[in-house]
Image (tube, helix red, strand yellow):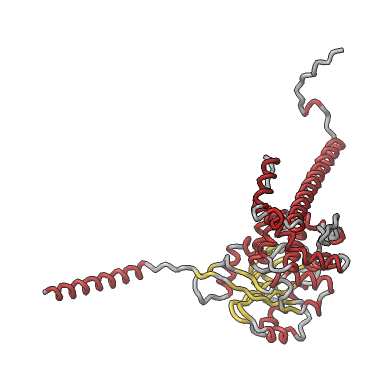
Amino acid sequence: MNNQPINLSVHSHDVQLDVDYVNWIAEIKHRYRAAQVKASVRVNSEKLLFNWELGRDLVQKKAEERWGAGVVEQVSLDLKREFLDAEGFSVTNLRYMKQWYLFYTEGFTKLHQLGGELVSTKLHQSGGEIGNVILQQTIAEKTHQLGAEFPSAFACVPWRHHVEIISKCKSIDEALFYIGKTIEQGLSRAALLNCIKANLYEHQGKIVNNFTEHLPALQSQLVQEVLKENYDFGFATVGHEIYDECELEDALTKSITDLLLELGSGFAFVGRKKELIVGGKSRKIDLLFYHIRLRCYVVCELKAREFEPEFAGKLNFYVNAVDELLKHDDENPTIGLLICSDMNKADVQWSFKGISTPMGVATYNNVRIQDVLPTQEQLKERMELLQKELRETKRLMNKCTE
């Protein structure tokens, strides 16, 4: 029997391809990509569980009291020596594992006492639409002597995200908020850091609004999760300390990517000065967006000054106009968002009385003022003045030496 290997060159023209074959290959590719994702999640889950348990061991065994202050360094050396190609066994990383476990111990003790409702509730409040599957996984796979459990939902968040969260958050509630946002929106590490830097936990859901009165409960909750109390326009630069709305719009739309990032996930830019014809007259909206998750238009009016009651009436007009002229029947009601430099909350609340359209008022800060260079004429004048001062100084010096 000839066991010699067959040598040949495979070409695509050696077979006859039809629709069934193309569909089959597409299905195989889809299955393989799905397997890759599952494998990645599985690997991340196992690594995170390992980190959690190692952090637990350092706490539970009171390692530093038992074996000395340098025990973490020794553990790091032993693991690196055994697993030469592995990463994550640095002294710093081991200390983060311990800190990670300690950070949540108090919260998980409450979780144990409340029958598992604490983290489930917090993740639901934080993430909005994280989904029942993840919420049902918040009670975990292993119970330890301290009563602290590892929530399976944590496995959906990369390790470096966890490190940033426990390093920068002041409370378990705040940490769970950012875990929820990471899971829901698939935040990159950079995007997560931007959210933390902007203090999204404090600002989100606190916008002055009338949503609860004029939107269904679920839609109202989602809108309040999406909109912020304050927006950081630090990416925008205007020419002078005193500027108007047009200059602010210019500065924001020149950096439209940064603006969309600051507004948050789901915003799509429709246009600036979007023109609507109402009663034969041209009306122009400052900025018009569409929010994909909310499935509605968002009318955004900018004011480079403090809130005035008449602003609410104008925004109400634009929201109604978009509802009538742009919104489709299967879309949710249009949302109005007024962003101004400052406001008195009582003024806003009183202005909303009698208005049935859903609206919110937020503030902005950190707009940069451009460093304006002197003109050629100004430079010439300054040079002449300097030369005159030098001549005068020289004359006085000569007079003193006479």
Residue shown at the point (39%, 68%) measured from the top left:
374
Quadrant placement of the N terminus: top right
Q: Position of residue 70 (x, y in %)?
A: 64, 53
| Figure check: 239 above or below 308 | above
Would residue 275 be found to the left or right of residue 117 on screen? left
Q: Please identify the quarter of the rendering in which residue 390 is found.
A: bottom left
- Give the number of marks: 0
Residue shown at the point (72%, 79%) measured from the top left:
208
Res 188 seen here: no
Residue toward you, 337 or 142: 142
Res 303 seen here: yes
Q: Position of residue 177 (x, y in %)?
A: 75, 66
Residue toward you, 182 or 345: 182
| Figure check: 236 above or below 90 | below
Quadrant placement of the C terminus: bottom left
Residue shown at the point (73%, 62%) measured from the top left:
102
| Figure check: 9 above or below 293 | above
Q: Residue furthest toward the top?
A: 1
Would residue 104 be found to the left or right of residue 197 on screen? right
Residue shown at the point (59%, 77%) measured from the top left:
304
Q: Position of residue 372 (x, y in %)?
A: 44, 68
Q: Please identify the quarter of the rendering in which residue 275 is found.
A: bottom right
